Amino acid sequence: MVSISMLIREQVHLAPLTTLGVGGPARYFAEAYTEEDVVEAVEFARSRDLPLFVLGGGSNVVIADRGFSGLVLKIAIGNPTRSVTTQGRVVFITGAGYDWDRFVAQTVEADCAGLECLSGIPGTVGGTPIQNVGAYGQEVSETIQQVRVLDLQSMQIRTLSNVDCRFAYRSSIFNTSERGRYVILQVSFALRQGSKPTLRYADLQQFFAGRSSEPTLTEARDAVREIRRRKAMLIVPGDEDSHSVGSFFKNPIVPHDFFEQLSARLLSAGLQLPSYPATDGFRKLPAAWLLEHAGFTKGYSKGRIGISRKHALAIVNRGGATAAEIIALKDEVQSRVMERFGIALEPEPLFVGF
């Protein structure tokens, strides 16, 4: 049996460690503050033939009511952010357990552009490469330079380049082809010092409409946080609409021919289907629009769960809900959107223990 020096706790309630606030206990639970802690925790799990789940900020996960029968490893590596200047970029290097919004604030304070539109997103730095987090016109794949990981196949620490991560819309190797292989330890971001903020997104353009001067990075960050607050996409104590995983469904990307056929059918019924450019031959559809026109409007309630009053894509826990109730609403939404539009909505969060 492997000798363990770190603290391993038993029957730890996981719901309070998530933004959605549902889920049962972990059979075993550990917090890793160093890379050595991560290795030790993995060895503990393997010595007892336990399944392993790596938890970050708990902002993009739905945990089953029965909990998790193995070891939940919470990554708390929060090494102070370091920065170096190389090839005209400022590279910020930070631990996977560091609070994401705090990190973004530090980059903005350093007058470095590239992450300002990702302000206010809950969770930790290590969670962002997994689903290639994006919002308001930016994605982390645009600035991630390297990801330092523990490879669970070889038990060696490796450094993966941006190309190695194979980023795409809301995906990477970490949640597709190599799911479960790596534990993210540290992420490096290459940012542009002194550059203007990214204002491609309509909500941001509207926020600053009528201004004669260019917004600063700080003003752009503040605007993003305010827009997120209005949509209950900012964690605010006491606001039940923020008890969610954020956007529960991905915006579907469909072939152009399918879009044209669906658009024509809906237009004959008096509905204009909005869309955005995607890769060649495809269109991206707003999942929020599909939900609302399938009957799941803002404020929809079903007992202890519902849809946010401020954002149609957020399934919320109105207090005391179970994971089973969340899943039931998810299934109902997917079924009705498929029935109405012929589109299979794909959830964004990770489902654990089901």
Image: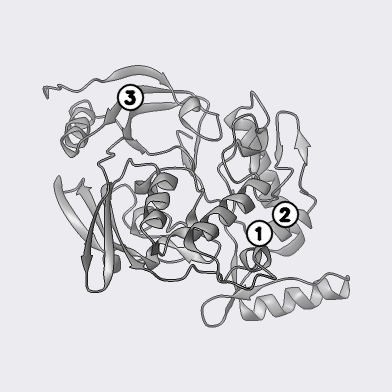
Spot the residue most to the top: 10
Residue ID for mark 3: 29
Seen from the viewer's position, the closer of residues 9 and 226 is 226
Q: Where is residue 27 in the image (x, y as percent from the top left)?
A: 36, 21
The secondary structure type at the circle numbered 3 is strand
Given residues 83 and 179, the one toward you in this image is 83
Q: Do the residues labelled 2 and 1 touch (CB within 8 Å)?
A: yes
Q: Which mark is residue 287?
A: 1
Residue in front for this viewpoint, 260 or 34: 34
Seen in the picture, residue 152 relative to 110 is either above or below; the reply is above
Residue 188 x %, y %: 27, 57
Structural crowding at the residue carrying mark 1, measured as other residues with C-alpha within 10 Å and reported as few (<14), some (14–19) or many (≥20) = many
Quarter residue 325 falls in: top right
Disc 2 to disc 1, C-alpha distance: 6 Å
Question: Badge 2: how crowded within 10 Å, few (<14), some, or many (20+)?
Answer: many
Residue 141 in sight here: yes
Mark closer to the chain start, 2 or 3: 3
**Residue on which the image places disc 2:** 291
Q: Residue at x 23, y 50 (%)?
A: 149
Looking at the image, which residue is at 56% across and 35% down? 20
Residue depicted at 27% across the width and 38% down the height: 77
- Amino acid at dot 1: Ala
